[in-house]
Image: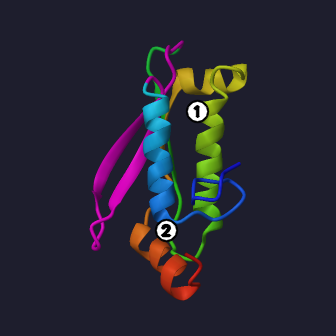
Amino acid sequence: MQDNNNDFRFDRYNTWSTIEEYLHKLRDENPDLVTLIEIGKTHENRSILVVKVSGHRSLAPERVSMWLDAGIHAREWIAPATALIMLDKLVNDYKRDPEIQTFLDNIDWYILPVMNPDGYEYSHSKVWNIT
């Protein structure tokens, strides 16, 4: 799980800064599978990050792409949490699960876990004051 210093956890709703750190760490630990793409900045200058996850080889002549976005509405915290669990499963089970390996070897996954980082962070810090 985690130690007590605000690291990423799957058993709670993480803040945007914790999610952003997790995405960078996931990319750094899996450079052969994970690419981070900044598609823009928010009004409050937060990065809008898409995670591209691709396997090593393709059996099909053309790779298919799958898009998943979450966190459109600031207080729907379950959507980013679900997208992040799915992302973690794809990346961390690639080497041990043949079904996931097939998915990643034939499909480029584009996952935008938090489409609205400003609103998401606002709902954590101002509305619910849990940070």
Q: Is residue 20 above or below residue 56?
A: below
**Residue 92, located in which quarter of the rendered image?**
top right
* Image depth: mark 1 or mark 2 in front: 1
Q: Vertical placement of 100 versus 122: above or below?
A: above
Q: Secondary structure at mark 1?
A: helix
Q: Is residue 25 magenta?
A: no
Any part of residue 42 in sight: yes
Q: Is residue 98 above or below residue 124?
A: above
* Label at residue 63: none
Residue under numbered circle 1: 91
Tell me the residue at 49%/28% (across/down).
30
The quarter of the image holding the C terminus is bottom right
Q: Specify few, some or many for label 1: CA neighbours under 10 Å numbering under 14, 14-19, or 20 or more.
A: many
Which of the two discs, 1 and 2, labels the residue nearer the N terminus?
Answer: 2
**Residue 41 falls inside the magenta stretch:** yes
For residue 75, side relative to residue 36 (left or right):
right
Above-or-below relation of 73 to 31? below
Residue 98, percent across and down?
A: 71, 19
The residue pinned by badge 2 equals 72
Q: Amino acid at mark 1?
A: Val
Res. 114 in view = no
Task: Give percent across and percent down for residue 81.
Answer: 62, 58
Name the image quarter holding residue 5.
Answer: bottom right
How packed mark 2 is, by other alpha carbons closer than 10 Å (few <14, some 14-19, many 20 or more), is some
Task: Specify whether 103 is left or right of 27.
Answer: right
Which residue corresponds to the image point at 57% horizontal and 60% vertical from the top-left? 6
Which amino acid does the dot numbered 2 rest on? Ile
* CA–CA distance in space, label 1 to label 2: 23 Å
Where are the magenta residues, as a range?
A: 32-59
Image position of 58 (left or right of 40) = right
Q: In the rendering, at what x and y percent does residue 119 appear?
A: 44, 76
